[in-house]
Image (cartoon, helix red, strand yellow):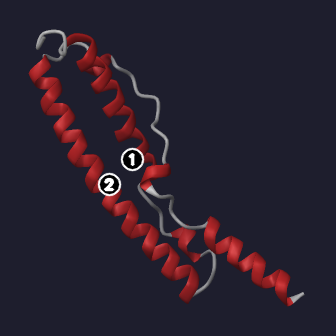
Amino acid sequence: MLKKIILTLVILGIVSCASKPSSIQPAAVSKLPYVNLSCEALEVSMDRESENLKALSGDQVSQRNWDIALNILLLPGVGATTGDSEELIAQSKGKMIVMQDEYVARCSKRRD
């Protein structure tokens, strides 16, 4: 019985942690905001979004570490109540993909 309780607490602790940034899948994002941007504006937007994604990923890693600590030190499952940046990271990754696709389609040909 004690083994089942411990196993349940361990599983609950692992499941309730914030996701690793690398495991978060990109969200579907419309390309409409990017189709009329100049190539230079796309480059600037990609640079800004890349910095945003780095910051969000850093926040997510910190949150994940806090979740693990809370689950181990306090009570399994408490980490799930602290929130994370998962949706923002998914959106940022989706924007990056759309912008990169748009850049390759329209701007990389200009440089050849």
Q: Which quarter of the picture shows residue 107?
A: top left
Badge 1: residue crowd in 10 Å (few <14, some 14–19, many ≥20):
some
* Residue 56: numbered disc: 2
State whether residue 84 is above or below residue 49: below
Query: Mark 1 = which residue?
Result: 88
Seen as rendered, the residue at the extreme front is 112
Contact, mark 2 vs mark 1 (Cβ under 8 Å): yes
Query: Residue 101, percent across and down?
Result: 32, 21
Query: Quarter of the image containing the N terminus?
Result: bottom right
Residue appearing at x 23%, y 19% in the figure: 103
Q: Earlier in the sequence, mark 2 or mark 1?
A: 2
Query: Residue 12, percent across and down?
Result: 68, 72
State whether residue 71 is above or below residue 2: above
State whether residue 15 is above or below residue 43: below
Residue appearing at x 71%, y 79% in the figure: 9
Given residues 106 and 9, the one toward you in this image is 106
As drawn, is 95 to the left or to the right of 73? left
Q: Secondary structure at mark 1?
A: helix
Query: Quarter of the image containing the C terminus?
Result: top left
Q: Secondary structure at mark 2?
A: helix
Residue type, mark 2 in image = Leu
Q: Which quarter of the picture shows residue 94?
A: top left
